[in-house]
Amino acid sequence: MKRIVLLAIFISLGIWACTDTENGGSDTSFDRGAMLRNYADNLILPAYEDALNATQMLNVSLQVFAADQSLQNLKQAQNAWTQAYGTWMYANAYNFGPAGEQGFNKSLNEEIATFPVSTIKVENALISGQFDMNDFNRDARGFLTLEYLLFAGIEYSDAEVLQLFVNQPNRKALLTACGENIESRINGVLQAWQTGYKEIFTSRQGSDVGSSTSQLYNEFVKSFETNKNIKVELPLGRRPGQTQVAPQLVEAYYSGKSLEFLKMHLRAIEDIYHGRSKSGADGIGFREHLDAVVGGPELVASTLAQWASVIEALQGVPTSPALSTQIIENPSALESLREELQRHTRFFKSDMSSVLGIAITFSSGDGD
Amino acid sequence: MLDSLHRFCNKKISAAPLISFRLIFGALMIFSTIRFMWLGWIEDHYTTPMFHFKYFGFEWVEACSTTCLYAIHVGMIFAALGVMFAHGMLYRLSALALFLGFTYTELIDLTYYLNHYYFVSLICLLLVFMPANVSPFFEVDQQQIRRATLFIIQAQIAILYVYAGLAKINHDWLIEALPLKIWLPAHDKLPLIGPLFSWDITPYLFSWAGMLYDSFIVFFLLYKPTRVWAYVTVIIFHSLTGILFQIGVFPVVMMGAATIFFSDEWHTRLIKKLNFGVQKPWLESPKLQFPRVFNYFLVLYLAFQLLFPWRYLLYPGNLFWTEEGYRFSWRVMLMEKAGTATFYVKDTATGREGIVVNNEFLNAHQEKQMAMQPDMILQFAHFLGRHYEAKGLLKPEVRAEVYVTLNARPSRLLIDPHRNLLNEKDSFKPKDWIIHYED
């Protein structure tokens, strides 16, 4: 028996030694820690910081407007809103950790950027003066409720909007309450990232379900799919059961800036894929991770080729009139974009998770 | 020949291995049932989803309420206690209750099909037919059983291992080291053994070791001189796969089940160590007469288990791609497969075609499993047809564009994207709407 044990030990040592020397040079490991640090330092934290700064500026404008409802102040507030919501396009994909669902809170994106806005709820709140920033009515607060209050609709002139503020005394109060709520929620998440969550995020370097790679990946895919499923398909009336187009379902319906935000959101998605900061500095991201795994380089090639088609289709969408009008008059350009997004889905969704070996659910798999 | 079958089956052997198997298996069932409830899986798996994928032939099985499912799980804990300790009719009822309870919960949704759940169901069924007069409380040295009763469990475990090993003898597994080449590098951050998984040779070593382990471990467990080392290998192998892969209680179940190959003396010692098997019977063991038909049942059961996994040979195409005849065949952790399935529902009156968002109806696990398995795609298509017809679509047509990647190869279409799936029915016949994987 002793001889068998010794033999076994020697054989395993031999294998160990051989593999060590033979493969020292062709180590295929990928540094997920470096990838996560890049995401935290160069994408996620800057995105929340930008969003917070822009929201603070927005709130200053809203205060100024609330004190004096001049045409100039309204313009100022509208611009500040456009700026702030634009920064949110770069931060809306990170709905995990402090921005994930917690207790009664939905994800940060749902809490502050739900659309379409329920105009009935908002109008009721304007009449009653009763509104709660922590209840379930997420479609009656947040960025897009602000938009409704500030723009009223693409057919409304600014003078008519000002008149609404005169006719509805509660409009000011709801406006500032929404702005403050958005700021405090973004601030809460940024604080959490700055005071410990970043370290947690960068330390969970596995690819199991609770790992940062898995969480970031899952939210990235969800955010990508939102563009196709919610921002494009629904207004085009392409859900089964929809019998006609639904232009009022576009994002940012009242300001008519849907296409601008869609472009920013897709740009942000592209940045996440590459691990690239908003200013264009390319770091270690999913793309580099893919380059380091079996089947990855081929997938990167087909992904980039299809993404080029997505961008081409996106650029083919006319910048005016507003998307909601195009959908009624001539949706063909947006329809092409929808098709390209559809073609792209598998590259981000199943192909990528499969070659990266990222776990998607907690449930047990088949044992060995 | 029949005589030798009966002689083989009816030979009296020590009951010790069976007694400790009952103790070990029952304890594992209690552990796994508590774990299932603790993780909130009753809600997540059974009562939250609005749609369940059915097993072929078991379409009538429905999920009962959350309370009812908790009651069933608590009942299973008591049934497992019965399997461990009960005597006579109570034992048999416990085993039957455990079998029915466990199998019922498994049949609720095909999404959660696992080979080891199937294994547990089969073992529960076999336990119903084990001698009911064998008890851990009675003096273990004096209890005897017919060899057939122990043999059938050993044979079942042997089939599981050997077939799992045979399934690994394929080009991707042995020559390409796929899917381990995909899975192992994802674990390079594990303490101590992590760096091992970034080496190029590791997936090859693991692939071959896995194949050899599954194919031969039972024989080394059966052969006394190699038994100890074989069991050490069992522990190392299953611990490793348990750490590496998200496979739940399976490693523990197999480590427990493999002890059935140990000697009578070992089992006798184990039972006595647990302070069982020492009392004189306080009631007379009922003398059970075994009808010969039981031995024929054994032959039939084994024949089914031996043959059923080979049914895939009757289907055209690549088994891993079509998955026709894939389940119930001990094919475990064999491939990395994932898909994206997009369903289009057309109102034939207006010609308007809409695109389904799957997660409106399915949880993440259901969507993932459905998107790569043709029979589940078909079920979901029929569900969508019914759902949207009820919502007012006229004579809907449902088609699906399904792109699947297998072992990290570029994804391609799994089924005919133009076929109206509502015209197709699931059956054992080959599905002619699958696009075969020509390679």
Image (tube, grey):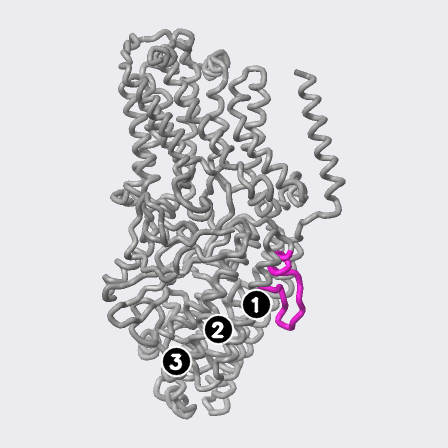
The residue identified by callout 2 is A180
**Labels 1 and 2 share a subunit:** yes
Q: Position of residue B16 (x, y in %)?
A: 43, 14
Answer whether residue B397 is magenta in the image: no
Quarter of the image that includes the N terminus of chain B: top left
> Looking at the picture, does residue B3 appear above or below residue B359?
above
Three-letter code, disc 2: Glu
The residue identified by callout 1 is A305
Which labelled disc corresponds to residue B312?
none
Q: CA distance from mark 1 to mark 2?
A: 43 Å
> Looking at the picture, does residue A266 appear above or below residue A158?
above
Answer whether residue A279 is magenta in the image: yes
Please say whether residue B23 is visible from this viewpoint. Answer: no
Q: Could you tell which of marks 2 and 3 lies nearer the N-terminus?
A: 2
Q: Chain of mark 1?
A: A
Q: Position of residue A263 (x, y in %)?
A: 52, 75
Tell me where the magenta segment starts and ends, as one range: A272-291
The residue identified by callout 3 is A327
